[in-house]
Amino acid sequence: MKYLFCLILSSVFVFSAHAEDFEETMEEVPRSFATYNWSVGAGLGVYSLPEDKDFSASGYPLDFFLDHNGDWMDWRLGYNMTQADLTYEAHGKTWKHKAQTDSLYLDYRSTSINGSLEIYGLAGLAYMNSALKTNNNIANQTDAGFGLTLGAGLFYMMKTWGLGGQFHVFSRNSNFNNVSVATGSNQFLLMVKYMFPGEPLP
């Protein structure tokens, strides 16, 4: 949690330190700021696992993405990683595991502009590779396949920079040694993105 706190604190510091610059930047900014063709961004946050009733997890999701605004469809291509230390009590023993899921996802993005706010929804597919590692003399297990994604978020736009938050759901069941485990996650991320100047769309 200390990393998330540091990210929030640094974001507030940067925003406060450059508030006047941001206000000047927003002057005469056309409403088409969000229709630049390409933008890149990253996010860090917290998440929960569907198996929380059986596991006690700790970890942070990390997300990198590329947004494209087209004249007929907006989309996002991204990489998402979750890693958690899992502790499970069974048969009088404490079982310690490390679960990591690497996801490459492609989402359709529906965007609405309201003043300086960019509000959007996400829906798409993800190729998810999950690994379960243990220190209890049990062989590591891996499983990969396609899952579904669904999410929504918003950005406060400052000409070419944006700060915001996002809720993102990854849904998939993995099979570890013939045991089905939900390896998706519910994520809340703090996001930052940069839009490359270009020709605004009509």
Image (spheres, rainbow, N blue to C red):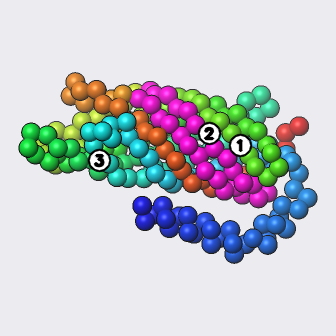
Residue at 88% across / 62% down in the picture?
27
The answer to which of marks 1 and 2 sits earlier in the sequence is: 1
Is residue 26 visible to us here?
yes
| Residue at mark 1 to residue at mark 2: CA–CA distance | 8 Å
Secondary structure beneath label 2:
strand
Residue at 27% x, 43% y: name it.
55
* Of callouts 3 and 1, the N-terminal one: 3
Q: How far is the residue under mark 2 from the one under mark 3?
A: 26 Å
At x 55%, y 64%, the residue is 8
Q: Secondary structure at mark 3?
A: loop
Residue 184 lies, with reference to residue 155, above or below; the image says above
Question: Callout 1: few (<14), some (14-19), or many (20+) C-alpha neighbours within 10 Å?
Answer: some
| Residue at image mark 2 | 152
Residue 71 in the image: state x and y as whole percent: 80, 32
Q: Position of residue 103 (x, y in %)?
A: 45, 38
- The residue under label 3 is which amino acid type? Ser
Q: State if disc 2 and disc 1 touch (CB < 8 Å).
A: yes
Residue located beneath label 3 in the image: 56
Mark 1 and mark 3 in contact (Cβ < 8 Å)?
no
- Mark 1 — residue? 119
Q: Quadrant of residue 132?
A: top left
Q: Quadrant of residue 130?
A: top left
Where does the image place residue 21, in percent across and percent down from the top left? 79, 71
As drawn, is 14 to the left or to the right of 168? Answer: right
**Which stretch appears magenta?**
146-172
Taking the magenta stretch, the answer to whether it contains residue 163 is yes
- Asked whether the viewer can see residue 199, the reply is no
Q: Residue furthest front?
A: 53
Q: Percent x, y for residue 80?
A: 48, 44
Residue 34, relative to residue 50: is it above or below?
A: below
For this view, does 162 lie left or right of residue 178?
right
Q: Is residue 149 within the magenta segment?
A: yes
